[in-house]
Image (cartoon, rainbow, N blue to C red):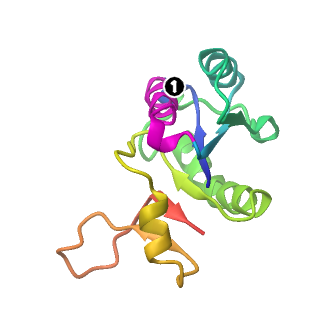
């Protein structure tokens, strides 16, 4: 299964953990494609991931954005929030369907089990609280 994440320098440490997660036996059959938004995170994560078979980088998406300079609600935050949906769409199209899995998500078992149980759906999206009847969703984990 193709999986992907969009990261910047503010998420390097979490992405290192994600790379480690994808080296667990139950994740080795899945490819993680990482789209870096700045050259610092790209360089660091490529070095960190050297020697892995299932970690790939999408170099063409660098937009020179770093989260270290962004705070919730500020101009930099709004900029990345406004371009992120189109980036997700482009990646899903390029990979012909993919699981968007953010750096703070850890897979303790093969995600294919969840996806295959719901193969009649076009899109699965993580819901933050299934016990509340509302429309709040979390795009941190979604597959199309």
Could you tell me which residue is drawn at 49 percent across and 60 percent down? 112
Q: Is residue 69 above or below residue 111?
A: above
Q: Position of residue 120 (x, y in %)?
A: 53, 85
Could you tell me which residue is drawn at 72 percent across and 23 percent down? 39
Q: Is residue 127 above or below residue 140?
A: below
Q: Which residues are magenta?
A: 13-28
Q: How many numbered callouts?
A: 1
Could you tell me which residue is drawn at 38 percent across and 68 percent down? 137
Q: Give yes or no for residue 24 being in the magenta stretch.
A: yes
Q: Position of residue 86 (x, y in %)?
A: 70, 60
Residue of label 1: 12
Q: In this view of the protein, which residue sits in the foreground, 136 or 114? A: 114
Secondary structure type for disc 1: helix
Query: Furthest residue to the front?
Result: 25
Q: Position of residue 8 (x, y in %)?
A: 58, 32
* Left or right: 99 in relation to 132: right
Q: Is residue 116 above or below residue 139?
A: below
The C terminus: image quadrant:
bottom right
Q: Position of residue 64 (x, y in %)?
A: 71, 31
Q: Quadrant of residue 7?
A: top right
Q: In this view of the protein, which residue sits in the foreground, 24 or 69? A: 24
Q: In this view of the protein, which residue sits in the foreground, 78 or 55? A: 55
* Left or right: 6 in relation to 104: right
* Crowd tier of the residue under label 1, counting other residues whose Cα lies within 10 Å: few below 14, some 14–19, many 20 or above: some
Q: In this view of the protein, which residue sits in the foreground, 141 or 63? A: 141
């Amino acid at each position: 299964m193709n999986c992907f994440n969009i990261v910047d320098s503010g998420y390097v440490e979490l992405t290192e953990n994600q790379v480690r997660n994808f080296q667990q036996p139950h994740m080795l059959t899945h490819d993680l494609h990482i789209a870096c938004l700045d050259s610092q995170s790209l360089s660091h994560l490529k070095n960190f991931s050297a020697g892995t078979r299932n970690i790939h980088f999408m170099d063409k998406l660098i937009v020179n954005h770093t989260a270290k300079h962004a705070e919730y609600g500020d101009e930099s935050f709004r900029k990345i929030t406004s371009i992120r949906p189109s980036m997700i769409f482009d990646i899903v199209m390029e990979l012909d369907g993919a699981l968007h899995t953010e750096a703070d998500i850890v897979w303790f078992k093969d995600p294919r089990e969840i996806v295959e149980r719901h193969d009649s759906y076009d899109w699965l999206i993580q819901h933050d609280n299934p016990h509340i009847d509302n429309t709040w969703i979390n795009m941190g984990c979604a597959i199309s």
